[in-house]
Amino acid sequence: MKSSKFNEAQIINILREAEAGAKTADLCCRHGISGSTFHA
């Protein structure tokens, strides 16, 4: 399994932004991830 380029704290912060109401497309663009990676 390939290791993530994000550590746990970064992943948690991205998910918190999503819960706060940020658009998924904006989050993915800002953090450099694909939409399918975000939803996985």
Image (spheres, rainbow, N blue to C red):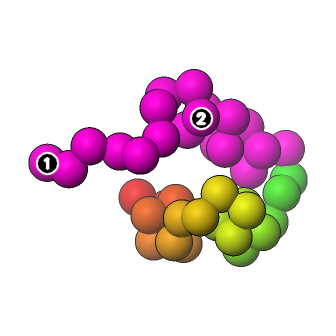
Q: For the C terminus, which image quadrant?
A: bottom left
Name the spot of residue 17 as percent of width and height, x first.
Answer: 77, 44
Q: From the viewer's perspective, tell me whether residue 36 is left or right of residue 31.
A: left
Q: Which residue is mark 1?
A: 1
**Residue 30 vertical position relative to residue 25 in the rendered view, above or below:** above
Q: Could you tell me how far apart the alpha carbons at marks 1 and 2 are, in whole angstroms? A: 19 Å
**Could you tell me which residue is drawn at 74 percent across and 50 percent down?**
18
Circle 1: residue type: Met
Furthest toward the top, the residue is: 9
Name the spot of residue 10 as percent of width and height, x first.
Answer: 59, 35
Q: From the viewer's perspective, tell me whether residue 39 is left or right of residue 14.
A: left
Can residue 39 be seen?
yes
Label the magenta part by its dominant secondary structure: helix
**Residue 29 vertical position relative to residue 11 in the rendered view, above or below:** below
Can residue 24 be seen?
no
Name the spot of residue 11 as percent of width and height, x first.
Answer: 55, 38
**Could you tell me which residue is drawn at 65 percent across and 42 percent down?**
15
Give the magenta range: 1-20
Instruction: Determine if the magenta segment contains residue 12.
Output: yes
Circle 2: residue type: Gln
Return the mark for residue 10. Answer: 2
Instruction: Determine if the magenta segment contains residue 4.
Output: yes
**Could you tell me which residue is drawn at 20 percent across and 50 percent down?**
2
* Element assignment for label 2: helix
* Element assignment for label 1: loop
